[in-house]
Image (cartoon, helix red, strand yellow):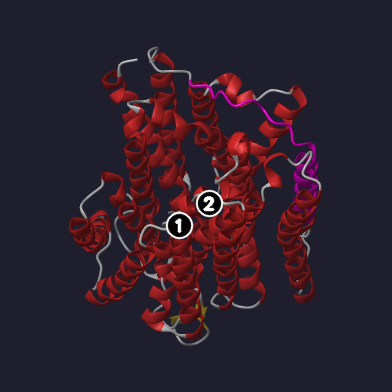
């Protein structure tokens, strides 16, 4: 195979990475808009994340169950190339479904919102197929020795998508003007701002998905890329995941039923809904505990779950994705929610409306881009002196890119640049302390995450706002650290272990709705205690997994 002939395919693949980030992060703007447009509560608005990230779990679980029944790896039988094509086609269908789902929708038609969720679920199912094969496919598109460079390029482009997605979606829905809260409410009520622009956006994205699928299909020189790893059955793990899925479906099914038939939301009903949501959340924790304890006694039938570092890592991925998504998805409500008779929002700043939220959501997701750009420095093997300089310069260059990306609609005040600049300095300090060690990185950034959330909870104004925004900076580098530690020492179970970890993107579907209901029952600022709990587990995981791997004498 001639590596240089695959530049067009790599360009296409990188574009797909961009749209993963673009759509995922733009949900941060779409969620508060849906809340206003469809007259729904904070929990219901977080169902955007439930549909989108839940699709990752369902897609991976169905493939795992079907592969077990057929005793062969279905995705491997397709080949990664075809798997990505099927995923692109499925996401295109979901994007096109958005048009009829919202056709003729007017302000206050709550029932239409659930059709939007179906469309997003289909898009997410396609993403689950794409992501399963994307990383090994990127490595195959050139010299394997430079595969990590291509993955870091793809990750950086993905983060750029998360940065500009909120800005573009805000521009598409609201235009270039920043309306006052009363003006915006009146325009939405009068259907002067509608979902027509959202339809156009998703039609365009659907066409791009089809174009990417066509390019992959007609690039005959590209490898199908099939893994040589034999499928390893894991019946006990399968049964546990099925039971967990039934509990989650039952919990959310009950809550959905309480929103139908004109049922009035009383205080008792709200508390019941919150309890049921926590049942779904604790079911995940209990499932991990059962796997951890049972597999350590009788490993047969558990497959990759017989390795404690993987089981602990599954819950770490669950909480990591959950906290990353929930901070950004509830940020809009934090900035919108007015305190009665003060004209200030929940953290003591002037109340913002849907059209004004984009830059802060972009800033949050841009924090992830900053960290990932810094994390990519080591790949290029700079000298120690140059690396120290780059650790300081690259984050602020990335910050400059975020500011430039927002200039199409927003501008930043000096105090905003100053506060976020301080947060970046804390992140840089963390990178110097971590010294590229995944365990140290997790410990330091989990601790910073806890500290940031606590400052946000117990302060107000810009200090609280930028403390919450700093969560993106501290989440930025966690995924590769957790993934690396979780699959260390798995040997032939590495492929299956990776699939289990992808399933735990489920955290992005469960934790945001839990926070949304906490906000409904209590208040939006105090709902961020859920983020403290997530960072707390990640800190525990960093300490515990080091002990587990040291006992196994595994290099990490």
- Residue, x 61% and y 66% (percent of image)? 516
Type of secondary structure dominating the magenta stretch: helix
Residue 461 shown left or right of residue 339 in the figure: left
The answer to which quarter of the image holds residue 214 is top left
Residue 259 visible in image:
no
Residue 157 visible in the picture:
yes
Q: Mark 1 points at which residue?
A: 438
Q: Residue at x 69, y 33 (%)?
A: 64
Q: Circles 2 and 1: CB distance less than 8 Å?
A: yes
Left or right for 444, reference 366: right
Q: Categorize mark 2 by other alpha carbons within 10 Å: few (<14), some (14-19), many (20+).
A: many
Q: In which quarter of the image is residue 274?
A: bottom right
Question: Which badge, 2 or 1, is on the more N-terminal residue?
Answer: 1
Residue 216 drawn in magenta: no
Q: Magenta part of the protein: which range?
A: 225-253
- The residue where tag 2 is placed is 485
Classify 58 as above or below 474.
above
Of 277 and 10, the residue lying toward us: 10
């Amino acid at each position: 195979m001639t590596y240089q002939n695959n530049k067009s395919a790599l360009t296409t693949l990188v574009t797909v990475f961009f749209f993963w980030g673009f759509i995922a992060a733009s949900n941060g703007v779409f969620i508060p808009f849906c809340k206003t447009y469809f007259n729904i509560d904070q929990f219901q608005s977080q169902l955007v994340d439930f549909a989108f990230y839940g699709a990752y779990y369902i897609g991976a679980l169905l493939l795992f169950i079907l592969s077990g029944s057929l005793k062969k790896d279905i995705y491997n039988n397709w080949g990664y190339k075809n798997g990505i094509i099927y995923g692109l086609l499925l996401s295109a269908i979901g994007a096109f479904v958005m048009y009829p789902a919202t056709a003729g929708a007017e302000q206050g038609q709550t029932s239409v919102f659930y059709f939007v969720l179906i469309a997003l679920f289909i898009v997410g199912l396609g993403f689950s197929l794409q992501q399963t094969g994307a990383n090994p496919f990127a490595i195959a598109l050139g010299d394997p020795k430079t595969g990590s460079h291509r993955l870091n390029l793809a990750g950086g482009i993905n983060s750029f998508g998360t940065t500009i997605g909120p800005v573009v979606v805000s521009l598409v829905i609201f235009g270039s003007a920043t309306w006052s809260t009363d003006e915006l409410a009146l325009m939405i009520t009068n259907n002067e701002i509608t979902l027509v622009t959202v339809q156009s956006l998703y039609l365009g994205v659907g066409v791009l998905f089809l174009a990417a699928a066509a390019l992959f299909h007609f690039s005959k020189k590209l490898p199908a890329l099939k893994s040589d790893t034999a499928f390893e059955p894991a019946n006990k793990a399968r049964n546990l995941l099925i039971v967990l899925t039934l509990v989650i479906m039952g919990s959310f099914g009950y809550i959905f039923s309480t929103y139908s038939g004109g049922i009035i939301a009383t205080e008792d009903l709200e508390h019941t809904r919150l309890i049921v949501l926590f049942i779904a959340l604790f079911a995940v924790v209990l499932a991990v505990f059962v796997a951890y304890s049972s597999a350590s006694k009788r490993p047969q039938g558990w497959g990759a779950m017989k390795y404690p570092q993987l089981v602990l890592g599954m819950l770490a991925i669950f909480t990591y994705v959950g906290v990353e998504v929930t901070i950004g998805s509830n940020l809009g409500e934090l900035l919108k929610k007015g305190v009665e008779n003060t004209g200030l929002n929940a953290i003591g700043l002037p109340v913002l409306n849907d059209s004004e939220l984009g830059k802060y959501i972009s800033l949050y997701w841009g924090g992830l881009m900053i960290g990932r750009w810094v994390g990519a420095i080591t790949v290029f093997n700079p000298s120690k002196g140059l690396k120290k300089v780059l650790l300081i310069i690259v984050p602020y260059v990335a910050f400059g890119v975020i500011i430039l990306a927002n200039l199409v609609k927003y501008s930043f005040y000096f105090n905003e640049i100053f506060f976020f600049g301080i947060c970046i300095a804390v992140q840089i300090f963390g990178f110097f302390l971590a010294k590229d060690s995944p365990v140290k990185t997790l410990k330091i950034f989990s601790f910073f995450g806890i500290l940031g959330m606590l400052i946000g909870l117990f302060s107000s104004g810009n200090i609280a706002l930028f403390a919450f925004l700093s969560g993106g900076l501290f989440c930025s580098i966690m995924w590769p650290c957790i993934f690396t530690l979780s699959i260390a020492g798995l040997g032939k179970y590495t492929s299956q272990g990776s699939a289990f970890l992808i399933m735990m993107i489920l955290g992005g579907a469960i934790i945001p709705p839990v926070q949304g209901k906490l906000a409904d029952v209590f208040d939006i600022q105090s709902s961020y205690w859920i983020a403290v709990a997530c960072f707390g587990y990640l800190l525990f995981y960093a300490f515990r997994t080091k002990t587990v791997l040291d006992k196994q004498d595994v290099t990490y």
